[in-house]
Amino acid sequence: MTASVSLEKVTCTFAARSGDGHYTAVKDVDLAIADGEFVSVVGPTGCGKSTLLNVAAGLLRPSSGHVRIHGEPLAGINRRAGYMFQAEALMPWRSALENVTAGLEFRGEGREAARTKGEDWLARVGLAGFGDRYPHQLSGGMRKRVSLAQMLILDPQILLMDEPFSALDVQTRQLMENELLELWSADRKSVIFITHDLEEAISLSDRVVVLSAGPATRPIGEYVIDLPRPRDVSEIRLSPRFIELHDRIWHAMKDEVLKGYQQTRNRTTS
Amino acid sequence: MRKRLWFWQVVLLVALFGFWHVATHPDLIPPFVWDNPNRAAFFFGEPVKIAKVIADWFASGEIYPHLWVTLQETALAFVIGSALGLVIGLWLGLTPFASALLDPYIKAMNAMPRVVLAPIFMVWFGLGIWSKVALGVTLVFFIVFFNVYQGVKEVSPVVLNNATMLGATRRQLLRFVYLPSATSWVFSSLHTSVGMAFVGAVVGEYLGSAKGVGYLIHMAEGSFDINTVFAGILVLTIFALVLDFAVSVAERRLLVWRPTQGETEPQL
Ligand SMILES: Nc1ncnc2c1ncn2[C@@H]1O[C@H](COP(=O)(O)OP(=O)(O)O)[C@@H](O)[C@H]1O
Ligand SMILES: [Mg+2]
């Protein structure tokens, strides 16, 4: 079976912000996501998670390596993917409804049809009646819901999500995680979910990929999460299997993170 | 609180005019600067006479054609200057080479006092409204241009990437992201640019024309008719206030999406 998304030996080197050196954020990363699989990628802040996601989205060309989408090499923007950004990405001059229907408008879909669909999606993310609010009139959680609807209305086969809920408070976050799982289970899209929160990663995913600390980040472990679905993210955290998985992954991560930390320290002192 | 403020503002206005009247009306109080009791009125006019000039202007309808001309010049200068500033600001904001190339020229043109161009515009466009419009355009253009240029540079890269991922083409990015973002910057400078269009119109009229409120002032000045000069100034001030109010109303309607302070956010 061909993977939905596969990164092959992807390396990204940036020009250093100061001086004329180079910084290799990620090096020789291999990552494959099967069709309909929910994969979380965890790693310490600044290790290169967003960089990898941008590569998968076609927003960033890797310095070397390849990206294949359903077996075909990716050229330009990944048209089969929806992207939910970590930072605020809504157009502030458009109302919630206009933001949700933006993608349909870009495709040239009729105004009325787009509107009906947009209202429907707003209702599905729990924002019925909020269509004419502007982003600044919505709470952080509501803006994330709008972003989610904005992405899902285009029915992408692949979802790329970059720490989408990291800015939310714990309660709102768990609510949104459950809603995401519910929406996802309806038609099982392939998901790459970036997070630095291991609990979030385990409770949502089929598989968790752990990245080493930068520079030259690469995957250092893969863990299949065999927890039953459907899941409730707050309940599942109490199950023995969850705790077991969490312990295992956390130990591996901690060792690697410390190792990475040691490496960078040695490099700077020698 | 607001009402009290209003009350005191009106009191201050009345007091100001009262003082003006008492200080300039001949023989009302003993002269304290000049020996000649008519001197003060000669230099500063008399509010009562000024009010009469204004009342006559409006009663006879004589002022309307002049106001209309000034308004036309202001509106045209604003629209043309804004459109040029928007287009060129967008263009230079999106093409780094052109902006680097033209940067010193734009700085130089902006640094030049634009009023000195008035005589040239008279030669090019004649004494009609277009020479005033041209002067206003040179003033409005740079304000709008710099705002749009800044606006384009400060479009959030996340919003751009998001629109790209939603399928926007380069043209659609221009139309649906850069343009609205730039227009919001134009609106944020609306008060200044409308004010500048107005200044261009009045100064142009003052320097040479056959119509407009600036022309009225210029004519009255030529015959040492200080009351008419002040009447013209007052009419212009009121005109500017009305214009500014209209801009505020337009702004409130156009920038509803802007966060304003003190607005409460609904809870999830
Ligand atoms: N455009 C860029 N230019 C230079 N350095 C960059 C650029 N983008 C990312 N980096 C660097 O690459 C590293 C990884 O960044 P990022 O992928 O955003 O990390 P994460 O999402 O894991 O927090 C960081 O050290 C960052 O400074
Ligand atoms: Mg990131």
Image (cartoon, rainbow, N blue to C red):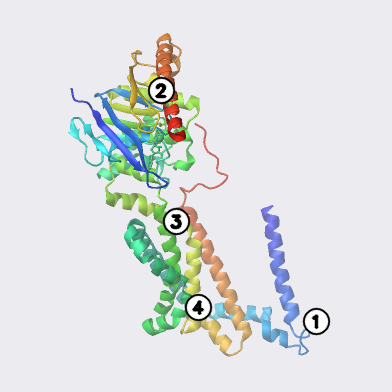
Q: Residue furthest top?
A: A240
Q: Which mark is residue B77?
A: none
User: CA gap, disc 3 to disc 2?
Assistant: 48 Å
The residue tagged with tag 1: helix, strand or loop? loop
Q: Is residue A161 left or right of residue B4?
A: left
**Chain of the residue where label 2 is placed in the rendered structure:** A
Disc 4: residue Cβ within 8 A of ligand 1's nearest atom: no
Q: Earlier in the sequence, mark 1 or mark 4?
A: 1
- Which amino acid type is shown beneath numbered disc 2? Glu
**Chain of the residue where label 3 is placed in the rendered structure:** B
Q: Read off the residue under disc 2.
A: A256
Looking at the image, residue A202 lies above or below residue B230:
above
- Which amino acid type is shown beneath numbered disc 1? Ile
Whether the residues at callouts 1 and 4 have beta carbons within 8 Å, the answer is: no
Q: Which mark is residue B29?
A: 1
Badges 1 and 2, same chain? no
Answer with the quadrant where ligand 2 appears in the image.
Answer: top left
User: CA gap, disc 1 to disc 2?
Assistant: 93 Å
Quadrant of the rendered image containing residue B92 = bottom left
The residue tagged with tag 4: helix, strand or loop? helix
- Which amino acid type is shown beneath numbered disc 4? Val
Q: Read off the residue under disc 3.
A: B185
- Res. A224 in view: yes
User: CA gap, disc 1 to disc 4?
Assistant: 37 Å
**Chain of the residue where label 1 is placed in the rendered structure:** B
Residue A210 point in image, percent of width and height: 36, 23
Badges 1 and 4, same chain? yes
